[in-house]
Amino acid sequence: MERRHFLKSAGLGVAAGTTLLAAQVQARETAAPQKNAPWMAARTEAQIAKLERVKVDLVAPPMVHKHEQKVGPAPRVVEFRMSITEKEIVVDRDGTTMHAMMFDGSMPGPTMVVHEGDYLELTLVNPATNTMPHNIDFHASTGALGGAKLTNVNPGEQATLRFKADRTGTFIYHCAPEGSVAWHVVQGMHGTVMVLPRDGLKDSAGNSLHYDRVYTIGEFDLYIPRDEKGNFKKYGSSAESYGDTLEAMRGLIPSHVVFNGKVGSLMGDGAMKANVGETVLFIHSQANRDTRPHLIGGHGDWVWELGKFDDPPAKNLETWFIRGGSAGVALYTFKQPGVYAYVNHNLIEAMELGAAGHVLVEGDWNDDLMKQVSPPGPIKG
């Protein structure tokens, strides 16, 4: 009775509504992970040792390392090596600085791509030139605080962690030293792992999706302390800035909200690029605060707001929501050339604090989609 009332109130006949619900269930079943698939089987150390090993060279965001979108049933051990960088960086056009801590020298850290059932093996290096202990918490992993308990490395040390990618989706990773997790995160230490289904992405009906390019956008809220005159302060080291930064963080009001470490990092020479007709996958992560990506002049053709590929994607979103501590994914096929603004659609954070970037798209204009019928001129009549 309740179901019939819902279908009627929604303007659907019972038969049509039942068909719709059945299609939604079928789509979910199509997208569901195959937990009994051979790549999901538990393996001994001896069996893991016999798997193919793939060594990957990481690249700095917004780029993502080369990878296959579909793979066969045999799982692999995918090897990554990542070094921690501590250095002073400039975060805006006025020359404001902060002492950042970063994975592989970038904000966000490099995106790592594997497939469901693969083993991700990371060697985390903390060079002797650093001053802080670090570790890594993978939201994609299971146990030991996401691996943080097993990767505590002091300056001059390294550790290697392996975990099984037993669920698909995009997941953040971040530094998580006991007692100073938030500070390490907002000083630059988070990135993304993308675990693809072995047979690639699917739309809500179970049809295959393909992307031509992929970009990573890591959003950071920064808390640069100010002096008594309101000017941003400068410090000689991370340790020197800690007390003031902690006080600024506790105010919960960021001084900057930036993409990829700096105001304007994804503009000009750093703009993301595409061609008309290409499909682009945008991975958007935020390890601390909620955000709401929007592509001005475009859409999210297919969007996994929660970043989990076992769920059917939403379709034709204008703006999507990424909760703090997660990463989401949007696919869009560009139809017009020009400069598209990719923004956090809290426009205050985008326009005033820095959470904005550009996508530069080349190709031929389509008058059928948009045309200026007459240019601005004097009012007539």
Image (tube, rainbow, N blue to C red):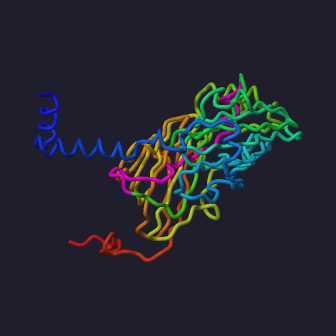
Outermost residue toward the top?
Answer: 179
Q: Position of residue 242 (x, y in %)?
A: 76, 29
Residue found 46% across the figure and 60% down from its top: 210
The picture places residue 227, in percent across and down from the top left corner, at 73, 32
Q: Quadrant of the C terminus?
A: bottom left
Q: In the depicted view, which residue is nearer to us: 193 or 270?
A: 193
Q: Is residue 248 left or right of residue 364?
A: right
Q: Quadrant of residue 277?
A: bottom left
Looking at the image, which is closer to me, 179 or 46?
A: 46
Q: Quadrant of residue 238?
A: top right
Residues rendered magenta in the picture: 180-207
Residue 343, above or below 241: below
Residue 278 forms part of the magenta stretch: no
* Residue in view at x 63 percent, y 49 percent: 76
- Vertically, is 364 above or below 134? below
Classify the position of the N terminus by image quarter.
top left
Query: Residue drawn at (55%, 39%), measured in percent from left and top?
Result: 41
> Whole-percent x and y of residue 172?
59, 39
The structure residue drawn at horizontal position 45% and vertical position 42%, both measured from the top left corner, is 34
Q: Position of residue 118 (x, y in %)?
A: 60, 45
Above or below, comparing residue 3 to residue 16 in the picture = above
Q: Is residue 198 covered in magenta? A: yes
